Amino acid sequence: MRRPVIVGNWKMHKTSTEAEELAKALVNHLTDLTDDREVVLCPPFTGLKVVFEVIKSSPIKLGAQNLHWEKSGAFTGEISALMLKDVGCSYVIIGHSERRTYFCETNSTVNKKIFAALDQGLIPIVCVGETLEEREKNQTFEIIERQIREGLVGLTHSQALRLIIAYEPVWAIGTGKTATPEQANEVHTFIRYLLAKNFNETVASEIRIQYGGSVRPDNIKSLMSQKDIDGVLVGGASLDADSFTKIVKFKE
Ligand code: 13P
């Protein structure tokens, strides 16, 4: 059984005061959170510590949105896995399409970041997904195949088992255009096939694959009803306590 994992990616939103307020509201709304689902908040770096203080006695976990692959050194503006651990993170998003598009991240940097995260015991949430142009040219599977093969190269089976994969079609992010549950599930099933090919059947059946892209309270149920969708990575709707709570509390 794969435990659903619901992650809020706050992107570049919320000052530390606002982050604290949102985290407090979520802790209050989610006092009855059951352990059949996992909830993770990913504020910007400046909100990590304050959010950790608010959630540390609750079942809600903390994640970051990025990291650098080196342990330390002259890398102005970067943050290491050790620094994330130090402020209470247990997860880190790697290779989000916004990082790939605006900050030149590649499958190769994604790969280095995965190793750095695993080295510190952080759970990597590895993002993959095609652009609208690629989908229209029928290149979706080709792009995903490459992102998985190159992004996960060199991982042992036991390292691969610690990952979460997030399928986020770029055309569905922040556009209000959600992939249909069937469209999303088709790619999730394909990712499982790739995991079986690159690793083995156990890895393929145990890794959790999240969907991301305009997830809202009104579409969570249909997305989660798909057999290969094991959770969601939520952007815009995670910035509001009520809407994120509704998403977290979806009923099958
Ligand atoms: P939206 O939910 O705002 O479409 O963002 C999705 C996303 O990029 C989460 O990482």
Image (tube, grey):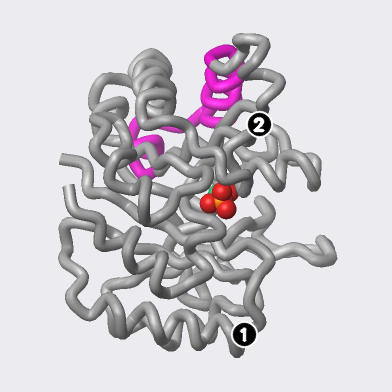
- Figure quadrant of residue 35: bottom left
Q: Which mark is residue 16?
A: 1
Q: Which mark is residue 107?
A: 2
Label 1 residue near ligand 1, CB within 8 Å: no
Question: Which of these two is toward me, 36 or 221?
Answer: 221
Question: Which of these two is toward me, 153 or 147?
Answer: 147
Residue 211 located within the stretch drawn in magenta: no
Residue 63 seen in render: yes
Q: Which residues are magenta?
A: 141-163
- Left or right? Give the position of 239 relative to 174: left
Question: Which of these two is toward me, 134 or 182?
Answer: 182
The percent coordinates of residue 173 (x first, y second) are 60, 44
Q: Please say if 35 is above or below 231.
A: below
- Figure quadrant of residue 177: top right
> What element does badge 1 sit on?
helix
Amino acid found under the numbered disc labelled 1:
Ser
Question: Which of these two is toward me, 211 or 78?
Answer: 211
Amino acid found under the numbered disc labelled 2:
Asn
The percent coordinates of residue 11 (x first, y second) are 63, 61
Q: Please say if 28 is above or below 201.
A: below
For the point 59% across and 26% down, which residue is it? 147
The percent coordinates of residue 176 (x first, y second) are 56, 45
For the point 60% across and 89% down, which residue is it? 17
